[in-house]
């Protein structure tokens, strides 16, 4: 069995090029995803924004569960 050094060098070049280009593409997509997403997702809204939902910790009782289920189906959430 004869091993060709030229073929192994070509394969190594191909694998190295593939790994480098994959890493570069990953870094480009990472930068694009950081650029596209909002800076602060959960910050307090400014301007004429109104808070729509306020959840009390006391409404999570098991006694109130049928009422919560009825509201869930009524609003269709």
Image (tube, rainbow, N blue to C red):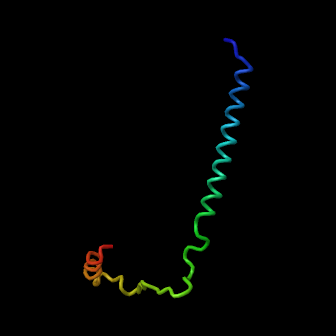
Return the x and y of residue 36 as percentages of the image width and height.
59, 63
Left or right, 71 with reference to 24: left
Q: What is the tally of numbered marks visible in this picture?
A: 0
Q: Residue at x 70, y 37 (%)?
A: 17
> Residue 34's quadrant in the figure?
bottom right
> Residue 38's quadrant in the figure?
bottom right
Q: Residue at x 29, y 84 (%)?
A: 64
Left or right, 20 with reference to 39: right
Residue extending farthest front? 48
Return the x and y of residue 5 as percentages of the image width and height.
74, 20
Return the x and y of residue 59 as percentages of the image width and height.
35, 85
Q: Is the residue 75 above or below the residue 16 in the image?
A: below
Left or right, 28 with reference to 47: right
Q: Residue at x 41, y 87 (%)?
A: 56
Quadrant for the C terminus, please: bottom left
**Residue situated in front as seen by the camera: 59 or 55:** 55
**Residue situated in front as seen by the camera: 60 or 46:** 46
């Amino acid at each position: 069995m004869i091993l060709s050094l030229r073929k192994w060098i070509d394969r190594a070049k191909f694998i190295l090029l593939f790994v480098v280009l994959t890493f570069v593409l990953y870094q480009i997509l990472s930068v694009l995803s950081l650029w596209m997403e909002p800076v602060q997702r959960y910050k307090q809204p400014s301007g004429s924004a109104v808070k729509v939902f306020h959840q009390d910790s006391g409404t999570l009782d098991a006694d109130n569960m049928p009422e919560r289920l009825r509201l869930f189906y009524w609003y269709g959430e």
